[in-house]
Image (cartoon, coloured by chain):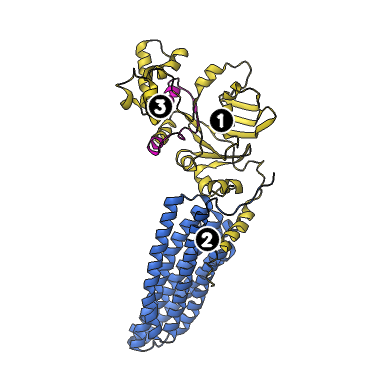
Chain colours: A yellow, B blue
Amino acid sequence: MTVDTNSSSLSSNALSSDDARDTSRDYRTTVGKIEVADTKMSMRNVNVSYGDKQAVFGVDLDIAKNEVIAMIGPSGCGKSTFLRCMNRMNDTIEGCVVSGSLKLDDQDIYDPKLDVVPLRARVGMVFQKPNPFPKSIYDNVAYGPQIHGLASSKVELDEIVENSLKKAGLWNEAKDRLDQPGTGLSGGQQQRLCIARTIAVSPEVILMDEPCSALDPIATARIEELIDELSANFTIAIVTHSMQQAARVSHRTAYFHLGYLVEIGATDDIFTNPRHRLTEDYITGRFG
Amino acid sequence: MTIKRSSSHISQRYDDELAAVKSQLFEMGGIVEKQVTDAIKALLEVDSELAERVVVDDEHINTMEVTIDEDCGLILARRQPAAKDLRLVLTIIKATTDLERIGDEARKMAKQAITLAEEGKAPRGYVEIRHIGQIVANMLSQALDCFVRQDVELALKVAQEDKTVDLEYASAIREMMTYMMEDPRSISRVMSIMWSLRALERIGDHARNIAEHVIYLVKGDDVRHVGLKQMAKTVHDQ
């Protein structure tokens, strides 16, 4: 054998051997299985445009009950836009047009007769920046159940607040200061307060749009731990820029590119043996 | 839109780190290969000087194993490699272990060569050593080649060849037993030949391991303990 110290020989051969496996470089066709066994949400041929500019192209995707699905991809790939369709958050954006079929259980989310307020109670959302109301910690969590009429008495409301804060892992830190403003908490605590606020209305699905990008590593680790615990009771869809986070928290990962869903698969497979070249390039840091 | 195909990382240093650890592994492979051929030669030609050199040089291989492992550890900590990069780092770590073990087997053979040089040549067994030695040295060479070229067909061939080595080894051992029964005075020397045959058979196993790692690296499927048929299916995407 000749000892080859030229690194390029290995990588160029790696390409040729991968080419054989990568049947298509076309990012317009999704690689992987979009259907799941126990469907909670089902999206078909979802297209989203902002005025003339189309942001999401014909995405088909099912989300299973109690699964954590991560959506990854470079900036502008449509992952957040797609996520926001799932509880009609895009309705508030002028010029945004959504077409296709989006179903929660068997209900059409975009049914014109559907009231979005109860929909958003069923499909809650946690945003990138913690955004507690300028109210007390207690009121932040109690607000949702109050407006949705989920508590018939103060005792019941107290119980919901306590349970939600417990599930969000904030109870021990907040129980002695429930009357203090939520904005006085640290960033990580505020994000957990927002999660408590979301789960207080007993949603079925929680959408998370980069929930840890404004947090330090310790607070991030706590949120990730929380996502794992919450998946016992909720279905979670998370958009994240951190691939390690997607690898750690999710069961399935969806890779978006230029508005198309390029690949969907078990997270374990996506991060060790992705099928599509673009997914591989993105998660290995070759995208550019 | 045309998709720009980029084979290098956004971080040039990451590329450099991977390239460096790869070339260290190939360098180690080259040295180990020479150790094996030298050990066989020392045994066949009763060259105790060459055998001594093989024993001493094994230290160098051990040091390389530690260095490569350290470098792979640093890449894992710094870069959190994924997909093909992750498989590459894992494959290098595993291949390094196999290469180090092959080095140990070569040293064992060299020690037997020294013993035989002191006690006098064994009456039989050199034909078998030469024959199996040739197959095994060729397997090792091909295992390293298939890593460099990422050639899964060649990797499959190496794995298949291991079967031949196992059969030849079993037959050679049976013959050695017969010699020992025929001439009990030669037992000690024939035992040296048997230990050397054993070392060669082990080297074949390690070469097969390296070939299996290469299939994992390229195909992403673990083909250890699955049998040759399944391995062939994986290689041919069936």
* Secondary element type, mark 2: helix
Q: Chain of mark 2?
A: B
From what the image shows, is residue A253 above or below residue B156? above
Q: Nearer the viewer, residue B173 or B25?
A: B25
Which residue does the image show at 56% across and 18% down from the upper left?
A116
Magenta-span inclusion, residue A23: no
Q: Chain of mark 3?
A: A
Residue A75's x, y, as percent?
A: 57, 38
Given this view, does label 3 or label 1 mark the residue nearer the observer?
A: 3
- In the image, which residues are magenta? A192-221
Counting other residues with Cα less than 10 Å from the Cα at mark 3, is it few (<14), some (14-19), or many (20 or more)?
Answer: many
Q: Nearer the viewer, residue A174 or B105?
A: A174
**Residue position marked by numbered label 2 in the rendering:** B214
How far apart are the two marked residues, 3 and 2, measured between alpha carbons?
Answer: 48 Å
Q: Are marks 3 and 1 in contact (CB under 8 Å)?
A: no
Q: Chain of mark 1?
A: A
**Residue position marked by numbered label 3 in the rendering:** A190
* Secondary element type, mark 1: helix
> Is residue A276 visible in the rendered structure shown here?
no
From what the image shows, is residue A90 above or below residue B141? above
Position of residue B8 in the picture relative to residue A178 (left or right)? right
Which residue does the image show at 44% across and 76% down from the upper left?
B35
Residue type at mark 2 is: Val
> Is residue B220 visible in the rendered structure shown here?
yes
How far apart are the two marked residues, 3 and 1, measured between alpha carbons?
Answer: 22 Å
